[in-house]
Image (cartoon, rainbow, N blue to C red):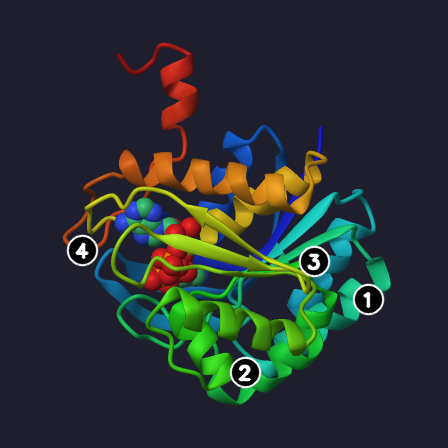
Amino acid sequence: MKKVLTIAGSDGSGGAGIQADLKTFAAHGVFGLSVITAVTAQNTLGVQAVQDIDREMVSKQIEAVFDDIEVDAVKIGMVSQTATIETIAGALKKYTPEHIVLDPVMAAKNGCHLLKKEAETLLIKELFPLAEIVTPNIPEAEAITGLGIDNLQQMEEAAAAIFRLGARNVLLKGGHLEGNPTDILYNGREFLYFTQARIETKNTHGTGCTLSSAIAANLALGREVEEAITLAKDYITVAIEHSLPLGRGAGPTHHFYALYKKAGLIP
Ligand SMILES: Nc1ncnc2c1ncn2[C@@H]1O[C@H](COP(=O)(O)OP(=O)(O)OP(=O)(O)O)[C@@H](O)[C@H]1O
Ligand SMILES: Cc1ncc(COP(=O)(O)O)c(N)n1
C-alpha cells in the first residue's frame, strides 16, 4: 500500500487541514500519515485561535515517520511560522521523498492568517524549490506575485511568475473567479487548463486542502502530474457536489461519496 504524509495544521471541525487530508488519502486507498504543525480552534464559521507546535516537536514528528516508514508522497499545507518552514525544509532535504505537493496556505476563508506575514518570503525561498507542484489559490498567487488577478490571462501571467520563483509545476486554482472554476497548470513549457462546472454551494470549506491531497495521493499511485491533477479535480468536484450542510457557515466536502455509492451504501 502506498504511504502519503500530510504536514499541516489541525482543523477540529474536520473540513480542512490534517483531517481533510487524511480523509482524502483514505478515499484514494493510500495509507495516511500526519505531522501536525499547528492546532487551530475553528469551525464552519471561521478560525477562532491558532497555537503553533514548536520547532523541536515538528522535527521529532517528521523524524519518527521517516525513520521508520517509507513515504511515497508528501503534501504540505499550513506551515504557520518561519521556524516550522526551516524545520520542514531541512527534513525534506535529508529524507528526499519522491513527490512533494505544496499548498501555500496563507489564510482561511474568514481572512484569519494561517501563515505569519514575515514567513511568506521564507516559504517561497525554502519550500517552493523542493515541491514538484505548488497549488496557490487566487489571493495567494496575488500575495506571492504582487499582481492583480481577474481573468484567465492574468492567471497565466501569475502562474508564470510563480514558476520563475523556483516552483517546477504551478497549479493556480481559479475557484475565486466567477464562472466555471478553471485551474491552470504551468510547467515552464505550456499552460494546461482544468475546468469543471461550478457547483452553487457555500460548503467549500477545505477544498484547497482536499485538492492538493488528492494530487499527492495520485502521484504516490504512480500517475504523472497532468493525470494526477485531472483525477484530483474530478475528485474535488464530486466531493463539493455532495458537500455536507454541517454547521452554520461553510460546510465540508464529502470524501466518501463515490466510494459509498459504489458500495451501494448510498441509493
Ligand atoms: N463552487 C465550486 N464548484 C466546483 N469547483 C470548485 C468550486 N469552488 C472551488 N472549486 C475548485 O476547488 C478547488 C479549490 O479551489 P479554490 O480556488 O477555491 O482554492 P482554495 O485554496 O480552496 O481557496 P479557499 O482558501 O478559499 O478555500 C479548485 O480545483 C477549484 O477549481
Ligand atoms: C488547518 C487549516 N489548514 C488549511 C485551511 C485552509 O482551508 P481551504 O482548503 O478551505 O483553503 C484551514 N482552514 N485550516
Q: Position of residue 204 (x, y in %)?
A: 29, 51
Nearer to us: label 3 or label 2: 3
- Residue nearest the viewer, comparing 35 with 54: 35
Q: Position of residue 175 (x, y in %)?
A: 34, 57
Q: Spatial distance from mark 1 to mark 4, Cα to Cα?
A: 39 Å
Which of marks 2 and 3 precedes in the sequence? 2
Q: Spatial distance from mark 2 to mark 4, Cα to Cα?
A: 28 Å
Check residue 120 in the rendering and tell me which mark sits there, or answer none: 2
Q: Which residue is mark 4?
A: 249
Given contact means CB atoms under 8 Å apart, are the residues at marks 2 and 1 in contact?
A: no
- Residue nearest the viewer, comparing 22 with 200: 200
Q: Amino acid at mark 2?
A: Glu
Secondary element type, mark 2: helix
Q: Spatial distance from mark 3 to mark 2, Cα to Cα?
A: 19 Å
Check residue 93 in the rendering and tell me which mark sits there, or answer none: 1
The picture quadrant for ligand 2 comes to bottom left
